[in-house]
Structure formats: structure tokens, C-alpha cells
Image (spheres, rainbow, N blue to C red):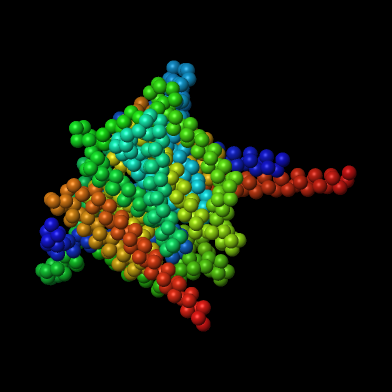
Amino acid sequence: MFSQLMSMVLTEDFLFSIIRITAPILFAALGAVVAEKAGVTNIGLEGTMMISALLGMLVSYWTQSWVIGVLAAIVVGILLGLMMGFFYLKLKTDIILAGIAVNMLGGGGTIFLLYMFTGMRGNTGALSSANILIPTINIPLIDRIPVVRSLLSGHSVLTYVAFLCVLLVWILLYRTSLGLNIRAVGENDHAASSVGVSVNRIRYIAIGISGALAGLGGAFMSMYYSQGWNSGMVAGRGFIALAAQAMGRGEPVGAMLSSLLFGLAQALKNKITGLSGLSSYNYLVASIPYIVTVIGLVIYAASTMKKVKKRQTKAEEK
Amino acid sequence: MKDKRMTMFNFVRGAAAILISLAVGTVFIFLTFLLAEKHYTFGQCLKNTGEALRYMLVGPLFKKVGGFNTMGLFQILAAMIPITFTGLATCVMFSANQFNLAGEGSVMAGGFVAALCGIYLNMNTGLHAVVCVLIATLVCGLILLIPALLKVKLGASEMVTSLMLNYIIQYVVLHFLNGTFADRSKGSTQTFPFQATAKIGEIIPNGSKLTWGFVIAMGFVVLTALFMYRTRWGYAIRMIGANQSFAKYSGMKVGGVIVLSQVLGGMLAGMGGSIEVLGRFNTFLWKELPGYGWTGVTIAILAKNNPIMVPLAAFFLAYLNKGCALMSTYCDVPSEMIDIIQAAIFLFFAAEQFLSGYRQKLVVKNTRADLMKTAEGRKV
């Protein structure tokens, strides 16, 4: 059984699936990174992904164009982010509660919206066709090199965008004045406001960007990953992304690495579920990604704790 | 005088938040008819919306041809049982500023553990049910030790761990439900039926499912309120929620209290789940998280973390839930409407600055009145 698993894991197909599964988590994790850098905990990522996944899918069906669908998903993500921002910054709703509200809209609200727009219940199975799904790109030459090709070639457009976004978010945060402002606001909003930075404006922008990234993640889920929308589709990826942000120490590259770890766990789960001898354990196997997330968080938290303690003892020795 | 005005203000504010939420819901109901495939005219849409609203807002308690619906009232009270418990659980955890969201998982775990005890233990009537509930309560308390200890010892966010825990609990329960404890003689996935001794009976045997669990729930409302406002532990929990640093520097054992609040939350939610399962069903058949945990969060917000207000909030949500179910049956509007309304309530009810201009005016008015009084006092 173990050898059976090993032979399944050591394939190019497995590498490919890790990249594919990581992408939506990565989008949301980057969204969490940008928001958290501005001092905003965006737990509405899960709901944002659900809603933008649905509306992206529907718009691409109505327009028969996946590009417009993806753009719609981004716009929906931004709008949801700004809505959370409005309640959080203007009406002073607790950001966690605003996030839970968005998640509620994502849970039941999407089912309602789907029925409202199409009369369908629970999923969009009948809608998907090739031209409204996100296309894949085969990179010439590279698609002939074994192993490397499964990492670099044949992925969907948005998969490349996801990994490109790591670089873009890094540039945004560390090479632009907006990024400097975002970090300043997150570090100490009073200090930032005392030198003339509009704290609220920066937070609106950060949470909007966060929403846009989650929207991309949602579009990826419905228009590529599961080729249609259904109510259990996102399955906690928005929450896992929060963990990836924490484990990645709030940095884009770190978030990418921890997203890859969670992608690996999910891919492993998918593989084990396919094994014949283990079918009676399918439900336990399904919990692997969530358990790995908790373990990852624990290891990260323990290591930071150790460092803090070390620093404290050093300071005391001095 | 001053307090009276502010209470009045809080009441108006809450009512306004709920009205706005219902208005948002109404817009979506209207849109559902407007976009429906049957191509209603504008007038028909308005008429249908009115009809749907009638089912949602009046339907749960009043029959179509006049007359009070007693059975409906019993059913609403019955539906209050699990969400009262999750509401209390959330109140205790949120009071300590612990955003632990594992109430959802605790309900499922509690229900499952109680069901197993109900099937496999042999005891006398009465005692059996109590033992089942107690074991379930304990188990859920232990489960929530995980996020609580991780938070206190390592500083890991209780929110993320508790959310992950919900999924883990769901899959572990499903594993045992489909494997070890499955009743394979039935078409659907379920356990064997509980023994009759473990059932929690109805107060009036009329099929409304209003069990003695309701009385227990109300008892725990009082107990939780006494705990939060009349004991030093409750005080410590609220103090940590209000200002953790202050609590720490005034010598409170912050870590212990944080653990306590989350474990108590888990126990309350688990108790709710076990009472619901033993009261409402004859066998365990939840195939997914039942959703009571999230409703509990809404209730805690409506009650502003005050246990005494929980039954009122629970009644409101149980009523609305039944209304949405009726609307979905008779008017072809999905019952998920409740989630949209709940989300709107969340946003507006928890908004501190909502109607703040109006409050400002009230404060000014109050101060003026006070100044007048003191001035008059001086004259005399």
C-alpha cells in the first residue's frame, strides 16, 4: 500500500496537481498578506471566494467570454472588500464580524443568488462549456522536458497569474510608496496619520486589493478547478489561506511556500482517496489538509515563541 | 432620565438595524420574482413579494385564515433549544475577546457522542439521558482545550485553529458514522436508534419536538448570566475582554481565564448539540455541520454578549428561520434568504457608529438638560 502510494506520488502528474491545487490558496493567502500588512484581518476571504466564483462563472456564461468573467470576479471581490471596509472603517463594525457576515453571504447567500439569477439550485453543472472556462497554456520547448514541464507548462492562465502575483505583491509592498504607506499604517496607524497618511484611505485600498486577489482565487475555483460552481466548492480554502499568511510570517514569498505546503497536503489527500485499499478511510483522509494546517500553525507559533523567549533572555543577560 | 434616553436610543438603533436587514431581504425577494423565468409583470412581482413577506414575517405564528398557530409557537420554541446553547457559548467566548468559532463543530461532536452513549450504554430512564449529555459536554470541553491551549501557550490564532477544527470534527464524525457505527440495514447513512431510556421527552407530547431540553436551556441562560455577572471568574472573563493588559497587570491569571472561557464555550455548545440530537431524533443522521454554531454567533451579537438577552435573540432567529422555510415552501423563494438577512443584521447591529449622528444629538440634548437642572438648582 505504501509502495502503491509512493509510485503515485513520484509522478509528474502529482507535481502538476500540487501547482494546480496551490494556486487558489495562494491567491487568497496573498490577499490575506496585503490586508494584514495594513493591520486588517480579512476573514471574509472564504465568502469573497465563493461569491466571486459564482458571479464570475455566471458573467462568463452570459458573455460567453472567460476574460470578462474573470474581470467580473475581480470587481466583485473589490466591491466586497470595500463593503467590509465601509462597515469596518466608517461604521466601526468589528472586522472579524464583518468577515463572518461576508462568509454567511458566501455560504447561503450564493445559493440564493444562483437561484435568483438562473433558477438552479446548488450548482451550475449545466452551464459550463469549454469557451467559458479559463484556458491552459502549453509553453513550447519546455513542454518537452520531463518533470520541469509539469511544473512550468500546461497550467491555466490564472495559475501563472497566481505565482506572478507573489512578485507583484512583493513589489507593491516593498517598492512602491503605496506599499510603504500600507506597511506604515499596519505597523502604527497613529504614527502614519501624524505624518499625513490617510489611514482610512490606505486601509480601503489594502482591503480592496485583498478582495481582488480573493476574487481571482474564486474565479480559479469555478472557472478552472471544478469547472462549474457548487455550494461546497471553496471548502475552507479562505481559512487555510489565513493560516498560510500567518505561517509565511505575513510575507508574500513565505505565504507562497506555506500555500505550497497546504497544496501538497491537499494533493496527497486526493491521491490517497483514489487508492483502492483505503476507501473506508476516505473521510479521515479528507481531514488531512485541515490537520496539516493546524500542525503548520503550531510549529510556526512555537518557533516564534522560542525566538521571542531567546531574545528576552539575551536582553536580560545584557 | 439620561439612562432612559440612551436605552431608548439603543432600542431604536437595534430596531433600525433589523428593519434595514429585512428591507435588504425584501429587495432580494423582489429581484427573485423579477428575474424569474415566468416573466411576472411588475405588479405581480410586487404582489408576490408582499405574499412572500407575509409568509416570512407573519406566517410562523398566524394561520392564513386568521387565528393563532399554537403548534407554530411550540415549533419555534423547540427550534430555540440548540441555538440558545450556541448563543450562550459564543457570549462566553466573545466576552473574553476570544474569537473561537468552533461552536459549529462542538454541536456536531456533542450530538454524535451523546448518540453513541445513547445507543451503547445501558441505564435507567432519566439517568441515561443525563449521562449522555454530560459525557458529550465533557468531550466538547476537552476538544476546545486544543485551540485554547494553542492560543495561550503558543500564541496561535484561536480563530484559525477553531475553523480548521470544525472541518476536522466533521470528517472524523463522518468517518465513524459511515464505518464503525453505521446501521447498514437502512438506506441512508445513520447510526442505530438510541435506546428509549436515552430519549429526552417532550413537555407536552404533541409532536412539536418541544422537549424538556427547552427548560434546561432556559436554566442555563440564568446560570450563565449568574456566572458572568456574579462570580469572580465571570468578572475576570469580561475584564480580559474589555482590556487584557489591564487585567494582566492587575494580577489576573489571563491564560487560565482564556482557557476557561473557551472550554466553557465548547461545553455549552456540545451540550446544545447533545440535547438537540437526543430530543429531536431517534438516531444520529447529520451528514454535515448543522449550522447552529454560526446562528449562535448572530445571537451573541444581537444579545450584545449578555446571556439574559440570548433567549430573545434566539426566539427572533428561530422565528425568522421558520418564516424563511415557509416562504420557500409556498412562494418559491429559497430559504437561504435567512443567510442574507443574518449577514445584514451582523453588519448593522455590530456597527458602533451606526446612527452615531443621532446619538450625538441625544448626548448634546442630555447635557443641555443637565446644565439647565444644575442652573435651576443654583437659583433655588
Horizontal side, residue B162 vs residue B379: left or right: left
Q: Position of residue A125 (x, y in %)?
A: 22, 43
Q: How many marks?
A: 0
Give above or below for B307 relative to B320: below
Residue A13 visible, this orientation: no
Give above or below for A196 relative to B274: below
Residue placed furthest toward the bottom: A318
Q: Residue at x 35, y 30 (%)?
A: B197
Closer-to-camera residue (B227/A244): B227
Q: Residue at x 73, y 48 (%)?
A: B367
Residue A247 in which image quadrant: bottom left
Q: Residue at x 80, y 44 (%)?
A: B373
Horizontal side, residue B177 vs residue A247: left or right: left
Instruction: Quarter of the image for the N terminus of chain A: give it.
Output: bottom left
Closer-to-camera residue (B124/B242): B124
Closer-to-camera residue (B39/A305): A305
Q: Position of residue A270 (x, y in %)?
A: 20, 54
Residue B366 visible, this orientation: yes
Horizontal side, residue A297 vs residue B353: left or right: left
Horizontal side, residue A297 vs residue A272: left or right: right
Q: Position of residue B265 (x, y in %)?
A: 45, 47
Q: Position of residue B335 (x, y in %)?
A: 37, 34
Residue B358 in which image quadrant: top right
Q: Residue at x 37, y 34 (%)?
A: B128
Residue placed furthest toward the right: B380
